[in-house]
Image: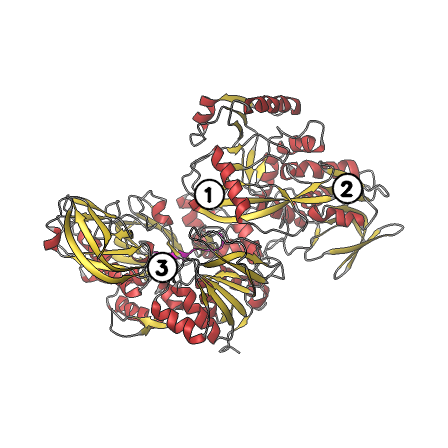
Amino acid sequence: MKIVDLVIIGGGSAGMAAAIQAKKEGVDNLLILEKNDTLGGILNQCIHNGFGLTEFKEELTGPEYLQRFVDQVHELDIPYKLSSAVINITRDKVVSYSNPVDGSVSVQAKAIVLATGCYERNAGAIQLPGDRCSGIITAGTAQKYLNIHGYLVGKRVVILGSGDIGLIMARRLTLEGAKVVCVAEIMPYSNGLNRNIAQCLNDYNIPLYLSTSVSRVIGKGRLQKVILSNVDDNFKFIPGTEMEIPCDTLILSVGLVPYVSLLENIGVPMSSTKGALVNEHMETMIPGIFTCGNCLHVHDVVDFVTDEGRLAGHGAALYLQNLLLGVREINVYPNSGVSYVVPQKVNLDNQEDVTFKFRVQKPVKDVFVLFESNNVIISKVFKSALIPSEMIMIKLNRDKLANVTGDITVHLEGR
Amino acid sequence: MYDVLIIGAGITGILVSRELARYQLNIAILERSNDVGNKTTSANSAIIHSGCDPEPGTNKAKFNILGNAMFDELTKQLDVEFRRNGSLTIALSEDQLKALDALEERSKINGVPFKRLSKQEVLALESHLSNNVTGALFFPTAGIIDPFNLSIHAMENAIDNGVHLFLREEVIDIKKKVSHYLVKTKTGEYKSKIVINAAGNHADVIAKMVEPIDWSIIPRKGEYFILDHFAKGFVEHTIFPLPSDKGKGVLISPTTSDNYIVGPSSEPILDKDDYSTDGPTLQSVRQQALAMVPSIPFGKVIRVFSGLRPSSSRHDFIIEYSRSDSRFINVAGIESPGLVSSPAIAQYVVNELVRPLISLKEKSNFNPNIRPYVHLNKMSKKEREIFVKENPEFGEMVCSCEKVSVGEIKDLLVRSCPPRSIKGVKRRTRAGFGRCQGGFCQPKILFLLANHYGVSPLEIPLDDVDSPILTSRIKEVK
């Protein structure tokens, strides 16, 4: 069996960044495995702009953004294989993949970075009530038909979920001549970035109905109408609030879930993000298996995915050089007001700063974000407004981490 | 002129056609849907029932028990996933033990093998069962099956043996002539000496085209959950509550695809084509299942669906000549345990009902075996390496959730009962059955189908022809 020092599974933003970083740190025997026939992952179909503001201080489209990394992959001569789906991995890091050129192949890796992205929650996952007609499609799939293949999925569209993909698709469908009747959001607030609500809905007079969801889809064959209903605080439909909307298409933008079946199959411990539990090097609980990007936790900005990819690539490089030593590992827990924190483990012997990423459970204003360990406040940062749709990052440098004596909790406190 | 024409390509009609294909006959089968086995056959619990609970002496009891014994050979011939995992009917209180005694008695009369288990014994078999369990009956002959490919492979095999399948043909009228029947569809006419009505939920509508009838079909809807692959062996057996007037009750079972199925509900409905699901019904299913297995992880649900049982007003299978003419045969009301009964029903229909009407001369070249399918997941690593090297398209994955390759889909397209829709590919290969529910693979499959059939992608439907996925090209493309 061929031996490869580092196998990166997934050639999207996270995987390419991990590979580039590892290569720069001296890992020469590496390989990116990409299941599609092109590098870049989901960015290939994200033809709108807004990417790269942090990374390049420029506003790029998805394809422009990804091309900069594809160029680096080529410049650094990083090997990659396309149309190469990984069938499984083992705890001993044997990676089995197949493609039409090499056939069905297994390689022995010394380290693995899993960067397989996320998938969309769909009609099945949300148990959408009503008929089983066509015309019900997730936003990303509709986007692929539209932007990659040049086909419209409908003429009169209702969008469920005001996450960013849903908002972007509202604008895109409108520009292509479809009528977007409305966007319904089950939460009392939008889950999209503010700039997207302004640029994708308000600019096109598309109404956004909050605390509203689809209580029934109706159609034999193709979708004919949806019933929207208001929901109460427990997300139960309120009788008497039904609104019937004739449409031929319902686009679902109801959340993304890390795509981690390869890790689940080998029993890697998972966290509440539905990605793996990781330490500050993005290393899972199986030493030498790293993970980053949307398959670790779903991001809203690709620049941060790239950054996290570099972190995993750096971790893998250290691991391969036997430089991941330390033993004093502590846990990091989310507490009141915080839904999750990444990483969930920190090695106190690590000599690097650690950036913690987390989300709040609901929109809050004027709060302190507290990091505490054994009742000692490690860090206290004021934030004027936090919303669940924006991932928050707080860096703790080594001096601060030196005060840590046990597990850390992250929580919010009113002013 | 056909010798025999079958209306309805559900599992009953298909297996009748395959049984008839042994003989030198001209056989047609009409199906109004865009695929075979597409309605009731596809949407049920996918259980090969032991036969413990039908009332002794009924058609249901008779055909269930005969049918159950036929599945080892049938699934081998047709290359269909089948496993006798055994079923457990559990009692959840001291009171229910009496009902368990009654079921034990009925199993004896029906001649179904069983074993009575104590609380400790059943918990040793299934550790996730509720601690309220007081006892159980274990039925070793019960099994689980892939119902999609049972019907599709049986149809393929029947076609390979000479049966003519006509899809998208909805029967609108039947006229009795001197020597034959004239069956009119929306687009054409078929003449046949003998007609077999296997039209499922619509069997009463079809029967009434020939004569007044004293029975009717009132569909009973059953709603289900499908759970993603998780802990293999969470439950090993099909677990039933005690049966009631409404049927066998909500079960939880592993499936042949290593998913779990939970359901069904049971409600009579008026619209024979209502496959909708609704929240309160599923909530009730969920609660009934949790009473048996409290730790079912409903967060792993990847799909909910409903199926319609063709329930007859006689509460039993109706397998008989029409009153006015033996050349028109009704095979109706084939609700649960219909799937398990279907091969035995097919033999009965051919040998007891058709044989007296027409000369049945055996064909010398009837082949009961289907051309084998490629099962990459059953190959050893080495076998797979060699096979994929020689057949590169089997190395290119279309569906990453269920690991389905381009090669497997292209193989389907050159078979005699190929898929014509996204759902057709899904039911045959499981592409789109996984956690992303086709989010990633649907476009790839759609363009593959369009290329193969040489049609515009706009013409590839989700399921029936009235369910298009794409509606137009974008403005920039002319």
Q: Secondary structure at mark 2?
A: loop
Q: Nearer the viewer, mark 2 or mark 1?
A: 2
State the image coordinates of residue B252 (x, y, percent, origin top left).
Answer: 51, 37
Which secondary structure class fits the magenta region best? loop
Q: Secondary structure at mark 3?
A: loop
Is B458 rendered above or below residue A119? below
State the image coordinates of residue B400 (x, y, percent, origin top left).
Answer: 43, 54
| Magenta segment boundaries in residue numbering | A116-125
Q: Where is mark 2, residue-wise? A: B215
Left or right, A80 with respect to A409, comes to right
Label 1 CA crowd tier, 10 Å (few <14, some 14–19, many 20+): few
A71 and A356: which is toward the camera: A356
Q: To which chain does the residue with label 1 belong? A: B
Q: Which mark is residue B35?
A: none
Amino acid residing under circle 3: Glu
Amino acid residing under circle 1: Lys
Could you tell me how far apart the alpha carbons at marks 2 and 1 are, in whole angstroms? 47 Å
Q: Which mark is residue B378?
A: 1
* Residue at 46%, 71% in the rendered image: A206
Q: Nearer the viewer, mark 3 or mark 2?
A: 2
Is A270 rendered above or below residue B478? above
Q: Where is mark 3, residue-wise? A: A34
